[in-house]
Structures are given as C-alpha cells and as structure tokens.
Amino acid sequence: MMPRIARILTALASVTLLGLFIAPLWRINLTAPQYPEGLGMQISVSSIHGRSPNDLNNINGLNHYIGMKVITPEAIPELRIIPWIVAGLAASGLAVAVGGKRKLLSAWLVCFALVGAGGLLDFWKWEYDYGHNIDYAHAIIKIPGMSYQPPLMGVKQLLNFTAVSWPDVGGWLAGFAFALGAAAVTAAWWSRKPALAA
Amino acid sequence: MQPSPFARFIRGGAAGLALSVFVSACAPSPKSTTSQGLLAGDAASRVYVAPGSYDEFYSFLSGGFSGQVSVYGLPSGRLLKMIPVFSQFPENGYGYSEETKAMLNTTFGSVPWDDTHHTELSQTDGVPDGRWLFINANNTPRVARIDLRRFETTEILQVPNAAGGHASPFVTPDSKYLVSATRFSVPIPQADVPIESYRQNFKGTLTFITASEPGKMDIAFQIMMPGYDYDLGHAGKGPSDGWFFFTTYNSEQANTKLEVNASQADKDYIAAVNYRKAEQCIAAGKAKSFGGTYAHNYVDPVSQIARSEMKTGVKMLSPADCDGIVFYLPTPKSPHGVDIDPSGEYIVAGGKLATVIPVHSFTKMQKAIADKQFEKTIDGIPVLKYDAVIAGEVQKPGLGPLHTEFDGRGNAYTSMFISSEVVKWKIGTWEVLDRMPVYYSVGHLMIPGGDTRKPWGKYLVALNKITKDRYLPTGPEMARSAQLIDISGDKMKMLLDFPTAGEPHYAQAVPAALLQAGSLKFDKLAENQNPNVATSESGGGITRTGKRIDVKMIAIRSHFAPDNLEGIQLGDTVYFHVTNIEQDWNIGHGFAVFGATTSGIILPPGATRTLKWVPQSIGVYPFYCTDFCSALHQEMQGYARVSPAGSNVPLTANVSKAAKTQGGRLPGAP
C-alpha cells in the first residue's frame, strides 16, 4: 500500500491537472518588423485562440499569402478528445490516491508519460501538416523549398516572422503534475524497504 | 545670404549660439564658448527623442486659418497627427465622405472651412482629464468636440445670435459649460440697419454651452451684452469657481477704422460673469425666449455616421433683469487675454497697448461688489472702481502683452507681441524675473496645464506669428514657427524651433500618460452598425434603386470584394460603401475611383466609409486602394463598367478569379 505522503502527492498531481482546463498548454508567438506588438496563438486542451481577440484571424489572413491552411479550431478532432483524456487522467489519479495501490500508481504515471509524449508528438505532426501542406498552386508568395512549420519548443525564423514556441502555464502545470506523480512513486517505493525488512 | 553675425547678435537669444560658433572660430573666447557650447549640447539632448521612444507630452495646436487641430509631441516638436475639424480634409475624406459630411452643416449650408483659434481640454476639478479637446470656429461661430480616444471630431455645435466666435471655447473646471462670446458685435437678431447705427443697434452675446455629455452639446443660455468686442475668456477656479471672465475692447463702440477709433479709451473692461447666478435667474424665469437657429452635428455613437439637427431658440438673459450676473472691471488698453492663476485669486489681463500688466484680485472684486464700489452702470452692468479691484501691476514688462500662463510655482509668463519676448514675473510681488526673446512676435504661449489648477511647469511653447529667416526660405508664404522653452529652472532656456501647420493660436498639452493607454487601436467589426456594412468576403454586393446604385464592398489585404462591377449606367449615382474588415492595429486601406469629383477616402480598420461617384461618360473605370497596405497593395484594385443609359448589361458585382483564390483560404470566403 502507498504511504500517506504518496497518496497526498498523487491527489495533488491530479488536482493540478485540472488546471489545464483553465490555463493554456502551449503558446506560439510571432513577431515581425511590422508586428512589434506580436501576434500570438494559445493552445489549450479544447481550443486554439489568439492571444488577443483577433490574433487568430490575423494569422490566418497573413497565412493566405503563403498558401497555408486556415486554422479553424472546430476542425481539429484532438481538441474534442484531449479534455476527456486529461479528465480521465485526473480522475484515475484521484482513484489511485484513494485506493492506495502502489502498482496502480506506477501504471498511472506510465499512462501519464504516454499521454504527454503522445500529445507532443501529435502537436508536432499538426505543426508539420500546417507548415508543409501548402497550396503552392494558389499561394501568392512562393519560395521553393520553404516550409513554415513552427518549432515545437524554441525559436525559428519563418520569412519575416520570428516564431517562438514554449509551454504556457498549462504546459508547466502538466510538467509539475508529472513531477508530483514521480515524487509519489518515489515515496511509495522508498516506503516499501522498511516494510520488506519487517 | 546669411545675416551678419552682428545682426544676429542684436536678435540675441538662440542666435547667440551662432555668434559663439563664429567667435570660437575667429577669436577664441573660452568663457563664452564653453557656456554657450554646453547650453547648445544640453538643449539638443533635452529635445532629442530617440527613434522608437515617445515624447513626454501630447500638445494640441489650433490650426488657425487651416480650420484644423495639429498634434505635436513635446519636447521633440514632431507632428503626430492632423485632426480635421472645421475644414474638409481630402487627405482622409473628412467632410467629403457620406459618413462625415454632415459635420460641416450650418444654417448657412455646408461650410467647408473655418478659422480655429483656441484648443481647450476638458477638465475635472480644474485639471485636464483627457476625455475631450474642444476648439472654436471664429468665422461662422461654432464649437467642436474631439474625442481623445479616437483623435477625431465627434460633435460640432453652431452658436446662434453671434458673430466672430473668438472668446471660445473655454471650459468651466467641471466641464459643465463651454463658453463662446462674440468678437464682432452685430444686430441681434440680425437686421438690415445702417452700420453707423452701431451704438443703437449692435449687441454682443456671451453664450454658455452644455458640454459634459458627448453628442448632447446645446446652448444653455446667452447673455445679451453691450455692443463691444468680446475677445477672450477664462473660467474662475478655486475661490473664483462659478465665475467666468471675458475681456472686451472697443468699448468706444467704433464701427470703422477700429485700429484708431477703438484705441482711444484708457481703459476697456473685463466682464466678470457669475454663471451660478445666471442659473438662478433662469430657474426664477428671468430669461426670455429668444430666436436664433443653429445646427448641431454629431457622430451617432451606434452607426458612426454624422447626423445634423437644426434647432431654434435660446434662453436669453439681460444683465438688467438679473441683478449681479455681470460686472465690468476697468482694464487698461484694449485687453486681449484674461488668465486666471492656479489659485483662482488673480485675474491677469493682457492690455495689448498697455505699459503695465494689470492683475485684478478676486477677493477685492468680491469686496468691491459688496461695498458697491461702482464707477457707473452700463446697460444694467455695474462698472467697479479700478482701484478697488486691482491687486497690482507688473511694471515695464515689455511691449504688447497678450497672454499669460502659469508654472504652478508662483510664476507667470506673459507673451509680448511687440517686443517679441516671453516675460517671466512673480505673482504677488509683480517683479519681472526673466526675459526670453522669441522669433518673432509671439501670440499665445502655452505651458502644459498652464491655465489650470495644476500646471506641469516644465516647458513653455511660444506660438509665434512671424517666421521670416528662421528656416530655409519657402517663397512668400511660410510656416508659422513655434519655440520650445525650458522653464524648469530660474532662467528660461531656449530649446527648439519647430514649424507648425496653419496658424496656431492657442494650444493645450498634457502628459502622454493621460492619453496613451486609452488611444483606440481599431473599431470592432462586430460593433460596426453602419447600415451599409459588409463584414465578410461574401457580404458585398450591388443594388439598384432607380438611378441610385449602392455597392457594398470589403477591403482586406490585398483585395476588394467585389472588385468587378457591371451594369452601372450613365446618369446613375454610385455609392461605394467600403468596409475595412481588418481587425489589426494600423492596417488601413483607402479607396478612390477614377473620375470622381471628390476626395478619396481612408478606411481605418473596422470602419465603413462611403464615397459618392457620378460617372460622367461610358467606359471602364479603375478603383484602387490608396493607402499602401501590404506587399500586394499594388494589386488591390478593381473595375467599374459604365454603360449607356438604358443598356441591357445586367447589374453584377463579381469577385475576380484571383481574389477568389486569394480569399478561398480566408474565413468567411465564398
């Protein structure tokens, strides 16, 4: 069975995950010489929206010059699934904390890691698709060999725009929740030793 | 040819810098070069605003005969914007577009020009609050409100029963009232009378305008005054709150050659008006219903379209019927400015031909009224005794005192037109502390907040009337010159010359922080209630109603939709209703059509503007974007085909193939 501290940490990790329903996971900021104020996109579990009310429209407006697809959050199926996955992760975490089974805790953390890795991979693929699936036939500005995939994490120059992509508050919360889960697992296995000795 | 170094030395001041260079080059004089050199370097750094940095102050200069307002940053003297007010402005279509042309309506019809004199910021508790800027029109008396979130004119009220709206538009400390007083007395109501019957038939009026509600300016009441020229005004504040002061000249009541005939009397007057008393008299039913028609134009807050309404009749008060509303304070020689110090106690007059600057005391005035220290009574207006109201006189201030502003540290600064200088003097002791020559012949001067309860006494701007050799010559007509003076120390320091637009009379300024954050970036398309708005690529179209064609069109980087119009016939009148559907900061478009006998229009993001076009002959006419908006701006164009009257070309508004493919990936695309 899990010690009290591991149960608390697991519960905390689960509650922290609920923060993802409030805070965006990721942010992509775009600045250019004529956009000193920048344009920004924020990606949350269920939507993609502009940092300012019109940013997404303005990004789409600019993207028409290079033939990129219009970003329409309603057309992205992941945004309908992710909330359930996060909710499931939080709920199962709470169940593990209540039930107190050490093995289930480890399994939960593995699931958490898989969800995280899967999410990042999916996000990268989404970025790849938008950056590479260009309507070259009708694009106004055509630059052979140029693709417009923003970075997963870090900074990249895309024509006149500098794209900066980092986890937003929700992303950091997810990382923190995972760290709490890992701490819970560590605590649980640590407490096992005296039990063995006895 | 450069003037000789000696001639420049005579002019003194900043020209001394040129001399010091000359001296240092020819006959080194370490003492003078060091001090002057340091001064020059200091002045340059004081006005230098690095690229990308902001000025400390917004200043609003009236445009004089340009009819507009210009906005300059201080201390750099950089022009930030021209705000069209009383004159048509082809640069952006103000006064031409269907949405704005009603702003210029008057009872005389549409008046496309006026002469603006005094900018005045709205106040709360006697301090500029950054809500609105007011400005007057002198020729066809009007007052205008400029919204300082938009930096656009949103309201204009005509002043009836008046001529020469010069003592205008000064506000009360709570912005409840604006005033406007007649510089030119005329028969009121107007009548066909001999000009020589001036004394019998000519009158002046003091007008109080309700100002605190945008879109609802109206004439609160007018006071019928003797037929003098009412020149300038300022509200009391602090202890003198509730009073308004106006200068008058031509108490001689001359009607010809005023330059001589209106300069005979030793003293003219400051009219002190107790407007709270006037309110009481109106409440007591002592005002008469009086005629007078006037236009009220305002931008409808919902549709953003200017509307006009014609109004008739005002409440007219006569001083004889309302005891104690007006008193005359004798003031030497054809006074021009009347300025109230920040404490509200001192009333400073600029007797433009006087050898002193007279300063009246509000406390003494109150006592003189209580003690009935009257010299005489004119048309029911008691004239107070000069000695009973005067607080002091600034002796030998210079020649031609006009206007006074204050630094909030107990000092006053008066402009001297004839001796071409700014004179600093001390309130209370009336001693002259410093003089700064200005180039040339200063009219108004302005300290940010310098006519309010709390001046920001760092800079002074001298608004000069004569330019001559200050800049590279530009033919017989040249820009008026303003000069920026540092008043933060004991001695004034000349910092900068900058040319201005039109002829700035008065100006106002406030710290940038008061306006910067509130400045609107664009109008929200979702809130655009123009009846002819198109909000999406597919929202445009063309309709015919008899001989009227309405085209709804959107502008977005980098196309119009629709952009090919057919079925227009000779004899039609075409209205292009163009909406800039961008929702992005500073992404403007423009619209102009070949052969239109009007201006183009500039479309800020989110706005709809309408251009009227009457085709003169058959053919195909291009229209295009006039504001370089994007990389494909040159491609942003379209065609309107005009067929003969009765032609069977169907009425169509198409989006070209190119625009379709461009728009195909845009939200709301067809």
Image: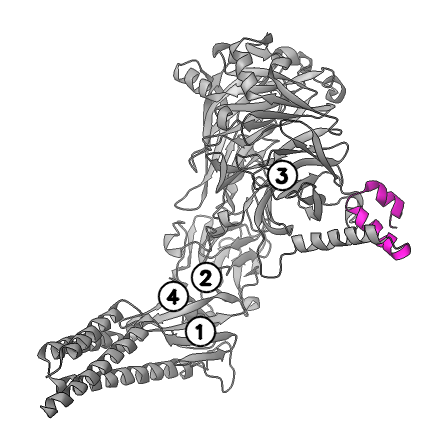
Residue B584: mark in rendering: 2
Q: Amino acid at mark 3?
A: Met
C-alpha gap between disc 2 and disc 1: 14 Å
Q: Earlier in the sequence, mark 4 or mark 1?
A: 4
Per the rendered image, the range of residues in magenta is B1-27
Residue B652's spot in the image, x, y percent? 44, 61
Q: Earlier in the sequence, mark 3 or mark 2?
A: 3
C-alpha gap between disc 3 and disc 2: 36 Å
C-alpha gap between disc 4 and disc 1: 17 Å
Label 3: which residue? B446
Mark 3 neighbour density, 10 Å: few (under 14) some (14–19) many (20 or more): many
Label 4: which residue? A51
Q: Amino acid at mark 1?
A: Asn
Mark 2 neighbour density, 10 Å: few (under 14) some (14–19) many (20 or more): many
Q: Is residue B571 left or right of residue B336?
A: left
The chain holding disc 4 is A
Asked whether A94 falls inside the magenta stretch, the response is no
Q: Residue furthest front?
A: A198
Label 1: which residue? A63
Nearer the observer, disc 3 or disc 2?
A: 3
Q: Residue at x 44, y 48 (%)?
A: B546
